[in-house]
Structure formats: C-alpha cells, structure tokens
Amino acid sequence: MPSKIKIAQLRALVAVAAAGNFSEGALALDLSQSTVSHSIAALEAELGVVLLNRGRHGATVTPVGERIVSQAQQVLALLESMGREAVQARGVDGGVVRIAAFRSTASHLLPGAIAKLHSRYPSIQVSILELDEVDEFHQCLADGKADFCIAELLEGESFETLPMLEDKYVALLPSNFGLKTSRLTWEDLQKHPIITSTHGSCSKSIYQALQRAVPPVEVAYQIRNDSTTMSMVEQGLGIGILPMLAAQPIPPGVRWVHLPFVLTRWLGASWLRDGLLTPSAFAFLDTFKAVYGRQQKLVG
C-alpha cells in the first residue's frame, strides 16, 4: 500500500482536475504552480500511475486518474467530517441554533430534525422564526438573526444550500367536485375561480404558469393564510393552487389532484457561505443532513 501519500497531494490533484489546468488549480489553493506540479508528480510516483495528461491546453484526467480523483474527494470529505466531529465534541455543550422557516417546513420538516438533534445533543436549544417571503430570509441571514433558513433554497453566490425536498404544486378541490380523473385540464381552470397565495415567490410562479394558457387563466382570490385557502376550497368557492407541503394537513372535505402543468419548488437549508457557524449550528447541519440528506420528491 502507498504509505507516503500526503493530504496536500490529494488536495492538489482534486483542484487541478476541477480546474483543468495547473495554474488555476494552484490559484484555487493559493499555492505556486510549481508547488502543485511537484505535489502531483510525487503522488504519481508514489502510486506508480499517470493521473494527469499534461498538454499545451491544460491537464486532463486519465481513466485511472478519474477513479483516484473520486477517491481523493471522499478522503477529503471524511477529513472535513472528522474535523467537525472534533469541534462539536469540544464545544457543542449547550448553545442555541437559530432557524428561520416557512410555516409548512417548520410544521412538517423541522420537528424530525430537532428530535434527532436533541437525542444526540440534549443541551442544544433551537429557536424558530417563521417567515413568509424569500426576501425576508435573505435579510434575516444578512442581519445575523438566523443561522439557517429552512425554506425555498436561496439563490446567489453568498449562500451555501442543501437541497432536500422537491415540492410539487397541486390543485385543491372540494371533495364533491365530481372530477373523475386525477388531473385537471386547462378548461377546468378557466371555468372556476382560482385561489392562490399572496406570498411573493409562490404567487409569481403560479401567475407565470397560468399565463401560458390560451386565454390566460386569471386568479380570483389571493390569500395569505394557507388554512384560509383550504376553508374556501372546502366551501366550494374555487380551485386552490398550493405546493403540497403548504396544503398539509388536507381536511376531509378537500382532495388534491394534478394540475395541467408541472410546477415545483426546491426546499432545503440555506446559510451564508462566509458565515461563522457555531459548534451547535454545525451539529444541527450534520443532523439535518442525516435526516434529509437524500433528496426527496413530494407527490409523484
């Protein structure tokens, strides 16, 4: 077995493979190009195989190099995980994790993660702030009022994200609507009043989808509270359109069906890329990954 492989060599290999050339790989590591080149040459000598093909136009990974790059990435990820475990063991006693969330994610997703967190770290406290608009989540993180947002994934280079759940928009009908299929038509939407949310990202997505119809489908009611939407649907005042998670729990007098178009939103965790997370926050993030790390799809 190779016994002289160094972590710095693995980092150099992964960086150059990702960049496609030695100069950009060195720049990413804040090292000189000669240092990176020497590290990879030493790694190749230790392993006895060529990992990168050098040429005038950069560096390309060889077939065996591709496999070893993948393994190097796994080693580096494990080292990072070891570091986090050590940090948590030194400083995770107590502390508060501050979370901003949609009402739907706070109600249906956070309890499972918090229960798992408390089973591992009973002394960590969790503070939850429920917000409605994506702009509010941006501001909440920027002002340092939350460590994480558990809602729609925030876009932009300032954020790290963990996609967790693809939430599909559905149509909500009174149980006596009489529809014999599991999917509405555009004609169905044009014949009945449409009830949607006032929340910015949700209402914008629905409006854009409805405008694709000929003629466009108009919205009759915009409601802030999801439970009010459900009550209006139950009374036969129109067809509601909501993400499935926001519609939960669906009362007995309401049923959901598919829309004549596909519209989804990605939910998960977002946090500041350059933010300083506490050991308690790292503990929550690792627990959240353990509970929801595999991406799921809500409604097939």
Image (cartoon, grey):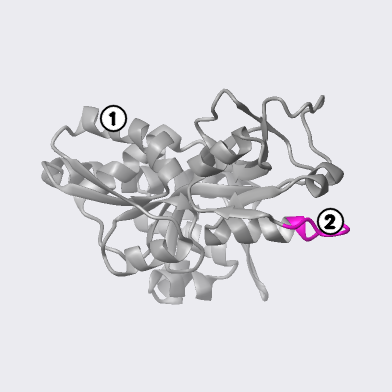
Q: Residue at x 51, y 47 (%)?
A: 267
Q: Quadrant of residue 54?
A: bottom right
Taking the image as shown, residue 40 lies to the left or right of residue 260, namely left
Quadrant showing the N terminus:
top left
Q: Secondary structure at mark 1?
A: helix
- Residue 139: x, y in percent? 36, 68
**185 left or right of 13 in image:** right
Identified at 54% across, 37% down, the residue is: 231
Q: Secondary structure at mark 2?
A: loop
Total marks in image: 2
- The vertical placement of 238 against 208, above or below, is above
In this view, the residue in front, 157 or 196, is 196
Q: Say what amino acid the circle numbered 1 marks.
A: Ala
Q: Which mark is residue 213?
A: 2
Whichever of callouts 1 and 2 sits on the residue coming sooner in the sequence is 1
Q: CA distance from mark 1 to mark 2?
A: 45 Å
Q: Position of residue 144 (x, y in %)?
A: 26, 65
Stretch of the chain drawn in magenta: 210-218
Q: Is residue 59 visible?
A: yes
Corner quadrant of residue 198: bottom right
Q: Is residue 66 above or below residue 174?
A: below
Q: Position of residue 193 (x, y in %)?
A: 72, 48
Residue ID at (61%, 35%): 235
The residue identified by callout 1 is 115
